[in-house]
Amino acid sequence: MKKILVLGVLVSIFSCKEAIKKEEKLVVENTFEEIQFVEPEITNTNVVNTVEDLLGYWVGDFVADISNEKRDTLYKEKKWSLLNIKITVSFDKIEKDSVFGHTIVAGNITTFKGIFIQNDKAINLNLDEHLNTKYNGFFEMYIFKKDSILDGNWSAYNPENVQIAKRKYNLHKKMFEYNPNNKVEYTFINEDKSNKIKYTDTIDGEVEEYEDYEFYSTTDKVFLKNASKELLEKDFVANLTKADIFILRNSIFARHGFAFRDKQLRIYFENFDWYMPVFGDVKDDLTEIEKQNIDLLLRYEQNAAEYYDTFGR
């Protein structure tokens, strides 16, 4: 039986061993409502012939269903990341004409209950997320029998309180499997964290002063090591930027299917096809190599250089 942790109250710095529970740097959550769910008996087929074939994880893009005008506004406000996010819908249990499960969106894990109707051609479902908050809503979905795509729409319970009140999706069934070989292959840049710098350059004997920005970002060193497969050495970690350490550490959690609440981490790891947000707590699944690497990375993270000059100066 897995435990899903729902966001609780934030408290301050704990020990390194406590900090590995979450992706946040030396900040963990102290109070949780623990929701227990039975892991589904997942069928090996991705094609649905009976309602029982739904049991398991369905993953895909959760796309904003909005006007072009609203879309342009979100781009201007630099809120483009809201337009297309990843969703995991887990069907955990089926009883008579009812289905029970949970959704994982942007690190938020919410249980649902719904009903289904099936005929010779298709299965139709209506699902209600349990918490009637501005972040939750209800799903209308369907799948044709002998098909592998779950289509549908989502509508917010309180549309007046959210920026995107309707979404659509095409989900595919996916088996979660921990794979320590999964790699990070892109540079991480947190554009919300930057530092203005001044520098000078001499042109034709004239000294000119410029202003630019350095960003909280990774270097190529982050591609050299896999923190799930090999023990990291102090000399290597000591020469990393804080962002290098941050991504190396969180890549461990990503491989275990951790659902990041941190927006920048979520956006970054959703670039990878192998990343599948499934769990709210993976500390019991970490290997000994991963635990040792997390402890080492945390020791150096506080004192690492905050910013990396992306322009090489």
Image (tube, rainbow, N blue to C red):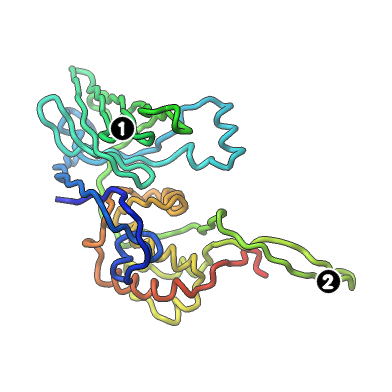
Query: Picture quarter containing residue 301?
Result: bottom left
Residue that appears at 89% across and 73% down: 205
Q: Residues within 10 Å of mark 2 (few under 14, many from 20)?
A: few
Residue that appears at 24% across and 38% down: 111
Residue that appears at 30% across and 69% down: 290
Query: Picture quarter containing residue 309?
Result: bottom right
Picture disc at residue 274: none
Secondary structure at badge 2 equals strand
Q: Is residue 101 left or right of residue 246?
A: left
Locate residue 141, reporting x and y percent. 30, 26
Locate residue 18, reporting x and y percent. 29, 67
The residue to which callout 1 is attached is 132
Secondary structure at badge 1 equals loop
Q: Is residue 184 left or right of residue 120?
A: right
Residue 227, above or below 33: below
Most extreme residue toward the left, as rendered? Answer: 96
Relative depth, front residue between 144 and 25? 25
Tag 2: amino acid? Thr
Q: Earlier in the sequence, mark 2 or mark 1?
A: 1
Q: Residues within 10 Å of mark 1 (few under 14, many from 20)?
A: few
Locate residue 106, reporting x and y percent. 38, 45
Q: Is residue 20 left or right of residue 308?
A: left
Residue that appears at 28% across and 48% down: 6
The residue to which callout 2 is attached is 202
Q: Is residue 139 left or right of residue 113?
A: right
